[in-house]
Image (cartoon, grey):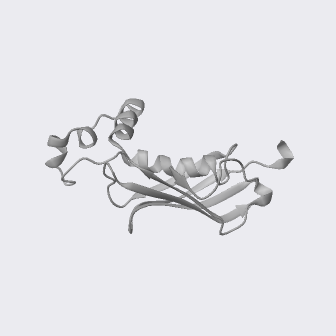
Amino acid sequence: MLDNMPRGTICIEDIEIGMVRYLRKVVTDRDIELFAEVSTDHNPVHLDDDYARDTIFQGRIAHGMLTAGLISAVIGEQLPGHGTVYLGQSLKFMAPVRPGDTVYAEVKVTAIDHQRRRVTLETHCAVGDTVVLKGEALVLAPSRKFD
């Protein structure tokens, strides 16, 4: 996995509008199989080449929520990072992610409510120049006041 910042915590006191963090990850067959196991979503469009070939996708695709999980990884590990609590996430799936694709997941700070420790983040994932997922997250950011 490649990203632009070390793991850790950015406290609400240090977050600024426009801050961006990201990661890149190649989605593997093993990732898809493990996600199916953990989620219990064994839809054959994710796991069976023959079945998936006859769908609108014309081949296997990764679970949409596996891709969305990369947004969660950026939020939970980088911005705001450790100690962050998810309050909400909207998602719009724009295009499929296939085994072997490199997904770029990014979050960008668009609003901060310091009093309530709420941070709004624009979120998206892309494969090359194609946006595959977009949305918005609302999180409760950690604070030095509570350490």
Q: Residue at x 72, y 65 (%)?
A: 16
Residue 25 screen position, x and y as percent: 45, 51
Q: Is residue 52 left or right of residue 61?
A: left
In the figure, 130 relative to 115: above or below?
below
Query: Visible in this render: residue 115?
Result: no
Q: How many marks?
A: 0
Relative height, residue 128 to residue 12 (above, below): below
The one of 112 and 99 positioned closer to us in this rendering: 99
The residue located at (52%, 54%) in the rendering is: 2
Q: Is residue 82 visible?
A: yes
From the top left corner, tell me how far across and down residue 101 is, in percent: 35, 54
Nearer to us in this view, 119 or 5: 5
Q: Quadrant of the C terminus?
A: top right
Residue sitting at x 21%, y 50%: 59
- Name the foreground residue: 15 vs 85: 15
Q: Quadrant of residue 82?
A: top right
Q: Position of residue 10 (x, y in %)?
A: 73, 53
Residue 70 percent coordinates (x, y): 49, 49
